[in-house]
Image: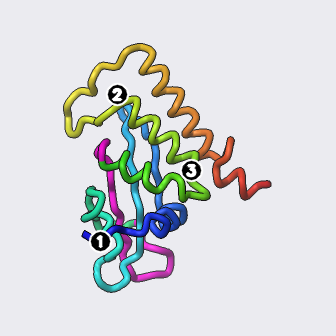
Amino acid sequence: MEKIDVRYVAGLFDGEGSAGIYPQKDCFKYSCTLGQADIGDNSPILNELCNYYGGKVFPSPNRRPKKSKKNMYVWYLNKGDEALQFLKEIYPHLRIKQREVDLTIKFIELCGEQREGKKRPRKLKKQQRLDRFDLYTQFLDVRDGQNGGIAGIRNE
């Protein structure tokens, strides 16, 4: 398979992607997503990313761009090894979402592979739980525009 230009993908991710830590009922999950409007042949760049890094591409009609009849397609990457490889590759080339990605990388490295379905989350040691919660609160600060988040850049 031909190598993808990681700088192009990082730019696309800076503009249209997200990486993050999200609370669930009894644990935290992480995910990495990238959305794109349908450009006629089922979002070829997202399918290429899916083939190269893994994950899945889903149509997301409820995320349709305003005043557009085109559907959105979203690439989801939430397996630890795949997400970690992708985020580490794009990290040096990011300009806007570096802090968000940095915290997600640290979270994945701390927690390891997340369990799918109804399986109970694996037990973490007390310090790991505290570290995980600390990363989550830092992520919320970034997402809400503090400490280097995009909203903080816009307000300066």
Crowd band around label 3 with a 10 angstrom C-alpha radius: few (<14), some (14–19), many (20+): many
x 76%, y 55%: residue: 155
Q: Which residue is mark 2?
A: 26
Quick one: 121 or 66, which is closer to the camera?
121
Secondary element at tag 2:
loop
> Where is mark 1, residue-wise?
2
Q: Which mark is residue 33?
A: none
Assign a secondary structure to mark 3.
helix
Q: Residue furthest top?
A: 126
Q: Is the residue marked by circle 2 packed among few (<14), some (14-19), or many (20+) residues within 10 Å?
A: few
Sort mark 1 into few (<14), some (14-19) or many (20+) by Cα contacts within 10 Å: few
Q: Is 130 left or right of 28, judged from the image as shown? A: right
Q: Position of residue 23 (x, y in %)?
A: 42, 36
Magenta stretch, residue numbers: 63-81
Question: In terms of sequence position, does the residue under pointer 2 or pointer 3 come before the other?
Answer: 2
Locate the N terminus and report the quarter of the image it occupies. bottom left
Q: Which residue is mark 3?
A: 98
Image x and y of residue 90, in percent: 47, 56
